[in-house]
Amino acid sequence: MTEAVTNAPADARQPKYKRVMLKISGEALMGDGSYGLNPPTVARIAQEVKSVHDMGVEICMVIGGGNIFRGLAGSAQGMERTTADYMGMLATVMNALAMQSALEELGVYTRVISAIPMDQVCEPYIRRRAVRHLEKKRVCIFAAGTGNPYFTTDTAATLRANEMACEAIFKGTKVDGVYDKDPKKFDDAKRYDVVSYDEALAKRLGVMDASAIALARDNNMPIIVFSLDEPGGFKGILAGQGTYTTVKNAKPAA
């Protein structure tokens, strides 16, 4: 199909951020299944991304691969860790291609950019080229993690967010923010509106893995945790609405 570049946002309201990273797990693509991809779920998430793209926001994405293969789980079952991690990276490419297909069905031009070169199916990661795609209002899906074993897709998302000069990382989850304990198990679980990086690390709040949070902290990159299951939630936050938790540096004492 012929690509037309447009810079005019469909939404008249000024979005809170101009360029963001959306990090979702591979499990988010499973729907009610226990493995693989659920096409209606992929299409629903793609629609959420499109609604934000239509506001004029430049979007990067990183999708995990846990719905297909998780390197750490393979390693725990006796597989050599480096091999298992590379297999997990390849799973993220499959998820990225599925999301690309769903987005382009909606008319959103998308590029899958892999840290492991595989030219027949996607582009290799070249930072300047990726930035140019964003400037042309294409969604960039970064696949294959960082290209290195022992690093999670959380760390990959934080790394790419900094490289792409994103203004925030949006972490889509099953709950509407960060809680002091599992809200699905404990009725008295408390949700944080704001939590510092150091507190998230010290209390092991499960926002992202420790390496990703430390990288975000060191580069002052806010992490916004929200529910991916809430229709319009992603767009609502960009419009200054909705329920979510922001992880950022603590304010210095007066």
Image (cartoon, rainbow, N blue to C red):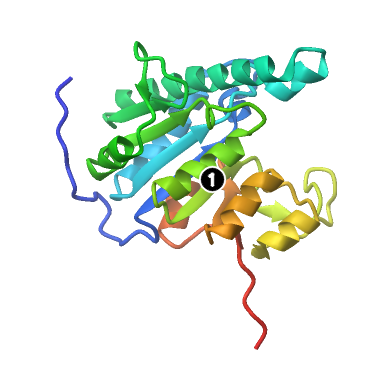
Residue at the (60%, 18%) spot, across then down: 86
Quarter of the image with the C terminus in it: bottom right
Q: Position of residue 127 (x, y in %)?
A: 35, 38
Q: Position of residue 95 (x, y in %)?
A: 50, 21
Query: Relative to residue 250, is residue 105 depicted above or below?
Result: above
Image quadrant of residue 245? bottom right
Q: Which residue is mark 1?
A: 158
* Residue at the extreme bottom: 254
Q: Is residue 191 left or right of residue 63?
A: right
Q: Is residue 161 left or right of residue 107?
A: right
Residue at the (14%, 23%) spot, across then down: 2
Q: Position of residue 251 (x, y in %)?
A: 62, 76
Residue at the (73%, 46%) spot, across then down: 206
Quarter of the image with the N terminus in it: top left
* Residue type, label 1: Thr
Query: Relative to residue 150, is residue 213 depicted above or below?
Result: below
> Is 83 or 136 nearer to us in this picture?
83
Residue at the (56%, 54%) spot, across then down: 224
Image quadrant of residue 120? top left
- The answer to whether one can see residue 39 in this image is no
> Is 243 or 246 nearer to us in this picture?
246
Q: Position of residue 24 (x, y in %)?
A: 55, 36
> Is 200 or 147 nearer to us in this picture?
147
Q: Residues within 10 Å of mark 1 (few under 14, many from 20)?
A: many
